[in-house]
Image: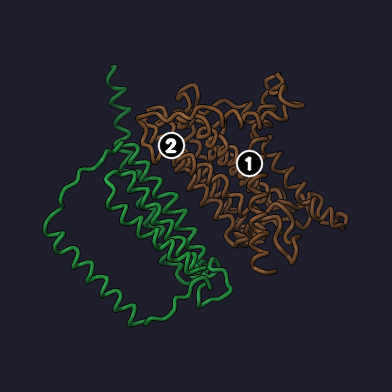
Chain colours: A brown, B green
């Protein structure tokens, strides 16, 4: 494969995946509105298109057409930079996520992952940790007390829960002996659901720690203190309007999708199917089967997100901190010790 | 390609460092420091130390600098005042920096000479091996004792910080509950 062909294939891949990600974000919003609607015994959006399916596109258009206000008291450079950091970090993380079988392109070109690197998991953690700046700086530069309170809460919350999040993944990494996401998936693939990390790997505790910490990391209910409407009007994005607000909104949903992808890869066997490797050998199935399973698993996670949002009330701030430091963190460390002992004396 | 990236990010690194000194607003300085840290991570990546690079981003750009920004936001620090600086510092400082760089350059040239730099072909003493494996081999096998001692030291520092904070914190509720009586 020549360099030019490689370059063009890669460019096409990046473009397609970014567009898919943005569409995914748009339709996650619709999924949430529909599901929360059903939970609250109403229909959700149903007017635009069949079953309201065109609603996200119309919402996007509406955001573009809204007036773009910049308050006079804001600190302009950082105020403008913050939404870009937020959305950028949410979109970059997808670059290292493998969502289909390896190879598959011409000349063994990796069609279903933008870049297969040996520290993929750490890259995702690094990008998430940079994403904190978007929220922190947005709140600070808005020059508004509600925004500042929101972003202070958010920074403290993200720093606290990042620890538990990172530690909960160590068990999985220990089992796979690698930080490469493809290796981690292939290690849990052979017998399907029985050897997935969540069941056969004994990482069910780690899975729930990851899930809870991830809810806090993405500022989702019940950990949505940074944007608690009843206390802080809009939290860190109070002063943002039009597309700048939409960028924060998209970043939040993009992060939800990323978290779903990581949980799928690390605990639920990624793109492999739950019945082990005895399905039909056929080019069509080999290409689209993995994609199908991956998307199903991620959508399952998104539904869990919405379900929790529709069910649980918000934490109080001290409860949130207590829970993170006193329960989640020790449990995550316990999980590492347990997994190491098990691997050593197996 | 590696050379272009090297010059690009070395440029970012220097520009960030200079901007850090020139800016008067603490938050701008903090952001410049993030640029410096992240560009350094890219330089590590170019030298083939991928784990070090990503650890640099997670620890320095992601955790330490978030704390810096957090403190700046919490104290709501305004613009700092410019002073002309002390006369001695400006007279002695620049020659001292020049001398320091001269010494460093002499040592490096003495050891390495003007050889071509090895960009992008991994750590030269262990080609083709993940440096995560090598690093953990060194940390948890050859240098286990120093590593553990360092972590105990850090643990003691954390416990000390908690103890100091706790003494002040426990006084407050007592005085508050004592007041109504």
Residues marked 1 and 2, same chain: yes
Q: Residue A223, how many percent across, how many down?
A: 53, 33
Q: Which mark is residue A138?
A: 2
> Which residue is at the front of the view, A149 or B173?
A149
Element under disc 1: helix
> Which residue is at the front of the view, A255 or A71?
A71
Q: Is residue A108 above or below residue B82?
A: below
Figure disc tally? 2
Residue B161 seen by the camera? yes
Q: Quadrant of the rendered structure where residue A250 is?
A: top right
Q: Which mark is residue A22?
A: 1
Which chain is home to disc 2?
Answer: A
Residue at x 36% of width, y 52% of height: B33
Q: Residue B43, how many percent across, how many down?
A: 45, 64
> As drawn, is A275 to the left or to the right of A222?
right
Q: Residue A120, how many percent across, how many down?
A: 59, 57
Element under disc 2: helix
Crowd class of label 2 (few under 14; some 14 to 19; many from 20; radius 10 Å): many
Q: Residue A159, how many percent across, how many down?
A: 46, 43
Which chain is home to disc 1?
Answer: A
């Amino acid at each position: 494969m020549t360099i030019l062909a490689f370059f063009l294939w890669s460019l096409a891949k990046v473009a397609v995946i970014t567009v898919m990600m943005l569409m995914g974000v748009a339709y996650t919003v619709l999924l949430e509105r529909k599901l929360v609607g059903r939970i609250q015994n109403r229909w959700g959006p149903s007017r635009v298109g069949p079953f309201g399916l065109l609603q996200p596109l119309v919402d996007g258009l509406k955001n573009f057409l809204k007036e773009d206000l910049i308050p006079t008291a804001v600190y302009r450079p950082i105020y403008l930079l913050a939404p870009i950091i937020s959305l950028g970090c949410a979109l970059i993380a997808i670059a290292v996520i493998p969502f289909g079988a390896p190879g598959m392109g011409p000349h063994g070109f990796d069609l279903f992952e933008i870049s297969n690197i040996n520290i993929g998991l750490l890259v995702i953690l690094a990008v998430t940790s940079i994403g904190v700046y978007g929220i922190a700086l947005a709140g600070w530069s808005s020059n508004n007390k509600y925004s500042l309170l929101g972003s202070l809460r958010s920074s403290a919350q993200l720093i606290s829960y990042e620890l538990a999040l990172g530690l909960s993944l160590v068990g999985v990494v220990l089992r796979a002996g690698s930080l490469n996401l493809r290796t981690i998936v292939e290690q849990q693939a052979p017998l399907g659901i029985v050897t997935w990390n969540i069941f056969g790997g004994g990482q069910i505790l780690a899975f729930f720690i990851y899930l809870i910490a991830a809810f806090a990391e993405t500022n989702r209910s019940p950990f949505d203190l940074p944007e608690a409407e009843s206390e802080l009007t809009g939290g860190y994005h109070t002063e943002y309007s039009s597309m700048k607000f939409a960028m924060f909104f998209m970043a939040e949903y993009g992060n939800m999708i990323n978290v779903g992808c990581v949980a799928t890869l690390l605990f639920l066997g990624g793109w492999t199917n739950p019945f082990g490797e005895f399905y039909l050998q056929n080019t069509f199935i080999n290409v689209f089967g993995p994609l199908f399973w991956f998307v199903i698993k991620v959508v399952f996670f998104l539904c869990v997100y919405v379900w929790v949002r529709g069910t649980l009330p918000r934490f109080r701030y001290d409860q949130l901190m207590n829970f993170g430091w006193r329960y989640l963190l020790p449990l995550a460390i316990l999980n590492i010790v347990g997994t190491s002992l098990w691997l050593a004396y197996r | 390609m590696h050379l272009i990236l090297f010059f690009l990010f070395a440029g970012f690194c220097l520009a960030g460092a200079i901007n850090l000194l020139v800016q008067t607003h603490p938050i701008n300085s903090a952001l410049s420091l993030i640029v410096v840290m992240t560009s350094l991570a890219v330089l590590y990546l170019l030298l083939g130390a991928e784990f070090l690079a990503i650890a640099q981003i997670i620890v320095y750009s992601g955790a330490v600098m978030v704390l810096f920004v957090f403190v700046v936001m919490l104290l709501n620090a305004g613009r700092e005042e410019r002073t002309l600086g002390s006369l001695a510092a400006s007279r002695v400082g620049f020659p001292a920096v020049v001398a320091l760089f001269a010494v460093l350059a002499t040592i490096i040239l003495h050891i390495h000479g003007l050889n071509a730099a090895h960009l992008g072909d991994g750590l030269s003493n262990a080609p083709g091996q993940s440096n995560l494996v090598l690093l953990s081999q060194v940390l948890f096998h050859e240098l286990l004792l120093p590593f553990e001692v360092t972590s105990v030291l850090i643990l003691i520092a954390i416990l000390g910080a908690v103890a100091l904070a706790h003494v002040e914190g426990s006084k407050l509720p007592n005085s508050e509950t004592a007041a109504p009586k």
